[in-house]
Image (cartoon, rainbow, N blue to C red):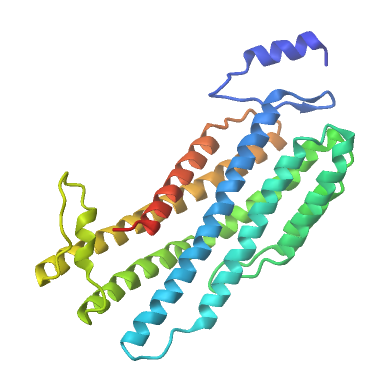
């Protein structure tokens, strides 16, 4: 490919709306670097989502245990929580390792960087081996994903970049399929946690172990409100707690939907590239941005103090 021809192609590429990734014997053009940057961001968000899902599961387990103790009934089934935690932890590990793979592909053009790509591919293969099925969720295609990771570990040169994206496309498709099959479970984990937290607060207030009226000073009214201890104040505080729990559920639903869209966009992009088609990165960038914002909002609500 001549320098003039390459310059002509680059000049016709839209800088934001439509990005063309050209992969050939001539090597990669700068758009490929932007693709990798976006893929790193998307994978980081996916990893954050699963990390948060682990925290939500732990909080829900803890809340349910205390609530059961107050009601003097049997402790919750810890096995179910443990199975979910393991499944979410392994999925988070794959996502974190995927970040590493995309980062290492950025230096694939450098012969000295090939060893780093190989080690990242090997790490991804090990992470994939550890993915268990989530009870009631999808059957994890470990063999298919593992074969794709092995392809990455055996790359030889920069001309293998398209081959690497093909393997990553297989992995992204697998992760998307898993996410879509388990999405209802992901949202129910947060819903259960929020509902249990609300019930627990009511139980604590009834036994005078906490004063939900202390939540009233958190209202943004432009004036100071003392924390009341009467029944009316406690009822108002409980209302705030219920609304806060609902806001957390909404933020989590938003994060879940946007993360699914993120995976769909990444999968669509890698499939299109492997067919030599023109691709747009806007859907991926928007979904990543929105998912990150919703995760940030959820985190802020979960950590909010009156």
Q: How many marks?
A: 0
* For residue 57, above or below residue 68: above
Q: Quarter of the image containing the N terminus? A: top right
Position of residue 214 measured from the top left corner of the image (x, y, whole percent): 22, 63
Position of residue 269 measured from the top left corner of the image (x, y, whole percent): 62, 37
Q: Nearer the viewer, residue 208 or 37?
A: 208
Residue 23 picture quarter: top right
Q: Quarter of the image containing the C terminus? A: bottom left
* For residue 143, above or below residue 11: below
Residue 301 picture quarter: bottom left
Query: At 39% from the left edge and 57% from the top edge, which residue is drawn?
Result: 303
Residue 238 picture quarter: bottom left
Query: At 86% from the left edge and 41% from the top edge, which residue is drawn?
Result: 114
* For residue 302, above or below residue 155: below
* For residue 42, above or below residue 78: above
Q: Indicate left or right for 236 with 276 as reference.
A: left
Q: Residue furthest top?
A: 4
Query: At 52% from the left edge and 41% from the top edge, which residue is drawn?
Result: 288
Q: Indicate left or right for 49 with 147 as reference.
A: left
Q: Nearer the viewer, residue 293 or 186?
A: 293
Position of residue 146 measured from the top left corner of the image (x, y, whole percent): 76, 59
Residue 151, can we see it?
Answer: no
Position of residue 290 measured from the top left corner of the image (x, y, whole percent): 45, 42
Residue 303, can we see it?
Answer: yes
């Amino acid at each position: 490919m001549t320098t003039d021809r390459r310059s002509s192609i680059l000049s016709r590429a839209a800088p934001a709306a439509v990005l063309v990734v050209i992969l050939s014997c001539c090597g990669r053009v700068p758009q490929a670097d932007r693709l990798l940057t976006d893929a790193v961001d998307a994978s980081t968000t996916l990893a954050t989502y699963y990390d948060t899902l682990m925290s939500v599961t732990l909080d829900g387990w803890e809340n349910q245990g205390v609530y059961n103790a107050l009601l003097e009934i049997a402790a919750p089934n810890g096995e179910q929580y443990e199975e979910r935690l393991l499944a979410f932890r392994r999925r988070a590990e794959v996502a974190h390792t995927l970040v590493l793979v995309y980062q290492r592909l950025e230096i694939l053009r450098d012969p000295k960087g090939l060893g780093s790509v190989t080690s990242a591919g090997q790490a991804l293969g090990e992470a994939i081996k550890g993915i268990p099925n989530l009870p009631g969720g999808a059957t994890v295609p470990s063999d298919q994903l593992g074969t794709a990771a092995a392809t990455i570990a055996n790359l030889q040169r920069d001309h293998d970049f398209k081959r690497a994206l093909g393997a990553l496309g297989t992995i992204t498709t697998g992760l998307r399929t898993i996410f879509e099959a388990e999405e209802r479970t992901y949202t129910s984990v947060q819903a259960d946690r929020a509902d249990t937290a609300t019930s627990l607060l009511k139980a604590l207030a009834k036994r005078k172990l906490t004063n939900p009226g202390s939540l009233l000073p958190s209202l943004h009214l432009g004036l100071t409100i003392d924390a009341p201890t009467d029944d009316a104040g406690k009822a108002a505080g409980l209302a705030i707690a219920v609304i806060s729990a609902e806001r957390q559920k909404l933020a989590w639903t938003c994060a879940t939907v946007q993360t699914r869209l993120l995976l769909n966009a990444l999968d669509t992009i890698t499939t299109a590239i492997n067919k030599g088609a023109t691709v747009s990165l806007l859907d991926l960038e928007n979904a990543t941005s929105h998912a990150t914002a919703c995760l940030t909002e959820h985190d802020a609500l979960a950590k909010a103090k009156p």
